[in-house]
Image: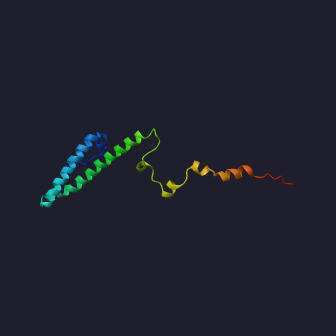
Amino acid sequence: MSQKFKVRKLREQKPEDLLKDLEKLKGELIQLRTVKVSAGNAQKLGRIGLVRKRIAKYLTVINEQRRNQVKTATKSSGKLPVDLRGKKTRAIRQRLTRSERAQKTQRQWKRLNNFPLRKFALKE
């Protein structure tokens, strides 16, 4: 287990296998923590950090896969869930769309129709 852990291999696995391995890692972390409390071996205590990082990698891959599934499922509807949309800035998210900006009130329409721009002929 001293080899470098490759996330590439995780991405090729099925979600069910990832979840099984994740449960094993969580169990191992619990065992390491109990050894820590009972003043156990120093070598095992150093492994706690490695196991935690490995759990984080598994969770990252699982979340990536779930996000990709949701993206492909909602691709046809055109509406993504809020957490998958681009964050941008609050001002950009709040501003009006093009169609909303182009809309005019009834009063504006009446003014445009009843009082169009005047055309003047200039004398030279």
Looking at the picture, tell me which residue is in the foreground, 3 or 40: 40
Whether residue 116 is visible here, answered yes or no, is no
Q: Residue at x 67, y 53 (%)?
A: 107
Judged from this view, the residue extending furthest toward the right is 124
Q: Quadrant of residue 30?
A: bottom left
Looking at the picture, tell me which residue is in the foreground, 39 or 9: 39
Q: Left or right? Give the position of 8 relative to 120.
A: left
Quarter the C terminus occupies: bottom right
Say above or below: 42 vs 17.
below
Q: Left or right? Give the position of 120 relative to 10.
A: right
Q: Residue at x 21, y 49 (%)?
A: 25
Q: Position of residue 111 (x, y in %)?
A: 71, 53
Q: How is the image coloured?
A: rainbow
Q: Residue at x 48, y 57 (%)?
A: 90
Say above or below: 47 vs 80.
below
Q: Position of residue 108 (x, y in %)?
A: 67, 53
Looking at the picture, tell me which residue is in the foreground, 7 or 112: 112
Whether residue 122 is visible here, answered yes or no, is yes
Q: Position of residue 3 (x, y in %)?
A: 23, 48
Looking at the picture, tell me which residue is in the foreground, 21 or 91: 91
